[in-house]
Amino acid sequence: MKQAIALRNYVLLHDDGRIHYPFTKYLTDQFSNPHTQELAAQSLRVLYRFCNAHQIELSLRAIDGRCLTYNETKELADLCYRPLTEIEAMSTKKIIFLTSPQSGKAPKGLPGAVTPNSAKKRLNQIAGYLDFYMKVFLLPNIRSESIRNKITIEYETTINKLNKSIKGTKQNHHLAIKSLPTEKYLSIIEAVFVRPEECFQTNSGKPSRTLYRDRAMALLSCEGLRPGTLGNISMADFQPISGHLTIQDNRAKRSERITTNTPKLKLGDSTQVNSASETLISLWPSTAQAIQEYIDGERSAVLRKRMTNRSAGFLFLSEGGNPIKHRGSITEMFAKLGRRLATQGLLDVADDPYFPNQKKYDFYGYVLRHSAASFFLTEKCREISHNQNKAPPRDFKDVPDRIKDQMKLRFGWTAKSNMPEIYAARALSVAANITLMDFHQGLLDAAQKRKIASGILNDS
């Protein structure tokens, strides 16, 4: 299948150019965010290839009140673990074989296989489409009440099976929050700000030509910004005098077509979700200074090299003077930074219980965001406890609501988001462990002192 954008409609086409109307209507009616539309389209292309290979025609099956069989839902789930490019390149015969019992288990652990979470999302999108197809295309056009009831039961059974076929991983458990310990987090901020020439280098070991740009982006990530947001910031969003940064959707400034690879604000174009991603944050003085040094130095130099200003008003530019067009550029910057931090010993795990069997911390943009959120919560709780002369909270229900609300505003979460709870559980569990370790160390020290005192007394 092929996909195209036509007058803000997301269109899926058959190989011969005909529009697949049910798919297109689902994508256009149900989603307004281009990123979500593209992800949903990929799931529908998997469904299309599966049905085409197995000669499944949903409209014909509806005449008999049928949807997918139990075995077909299992086979479809296994196919969702395959990369889309591989699925669409396969012959019909191979798809039938790979989704048959003779092929064995799905390739969950093989290189290139789709992760359980991604496969689960595919099935969830397919289930959403089947629900839409039943309600919009089937039920209104079937007169027989008995057939409508049968179709409803069959589709609901299939949808429920698809939604439960793959469990995925527990992303929302607080132990999945891979934030760095406070001392590591602060040491990285210090290294990036004070010694940028050691942190941002070319493959040959020379300071990068985008050293000050990368330093500013890394420090903004330490403030909690998402990687995609970094490439979305405009010059007008930065307020150097007050030290504030406006987080808002700036995609309208771009001249190129927006894709899933375009750096953009999360939920910026969505009308289906009440997004809290747009906000105003106060920057640390070091971050504001790093941004200004980049503007006055590298950014100005890049623009002076060209006859025309190609920046479109964006803050962070490529070496060619254009806005950063691909998220991969930001991802690669963090990957290089991680390698440099590792050589400096700043990612050594030591005895951190949250990273078992690892010698070094994983490092990417979201690790800094996670660390910023955990640090923000811990410091706010400590600050309030100090002012009120109370012990820090040991459970999320004891964290003041104003801190939770501040976190939602600072990190761009919706009012109903449970993310503060997850970070609180992680931060407070760490604090509890530290308290217990201090307590037990005190017991050991007291026992040792008692032994020493007893030995002295016995000797005398």
Image: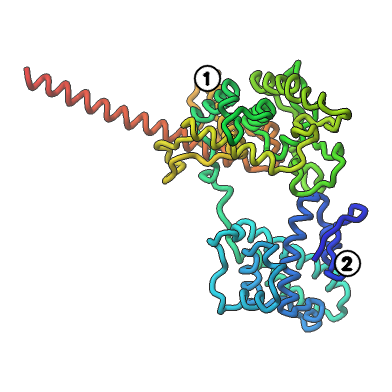
Q: Mark 1 points at which residue?
A: 386
Judging by the rendered image, the residue that carries numbered circle 2 is: 19
Q: Residues within 10 Å of mark 1 (few under 14, many from 20)?
A: few
The percent coordinates of residue 244 (x first, y second) are: 73, 23
Q: In this picture, is 454 found above or below 94?
A: above
In which quarter of the view is residue 208 placed? Answer: top right
Q: Quadrant for the C terminus, please.
A: top left
Q: Where is residue 345 in the image (x, y as percent from the top left)?
A: 46, 32
Quadrant containing the N terminus is: bottom right
Query: Residue sitting at 60 percent across and 78 percent down?
Result: 100
Decide which of 28, 230 is in the foreground and name it: 230
Q: Which amino acid does label 2 sit on?
A: Ile
Tell me which residue sits at (61%, 27%) in the image: 207
Q: Which of 140 and 55 is in front in this view?
A: 55
**Colour treatment of the image:** rainbow
Q: Is mark 2 on a helix, strand or loop?
A: loop
Amino acid beneath label 1: His
Residue under the point 55% across and 39% down: 363
Q: Which of 60 and 38 is in front in this view?
A: 38
Q: In the depicted view, which residue is nearer to us: 3 or 306?
A: 306
Residue at the front extreme of this rendering? 204
Whichever of labels 2 and 1 marks the residue nearer the N terminus, that label is 2
Q: Is 245 left or right of 75, judged from the image as shown?
A: right
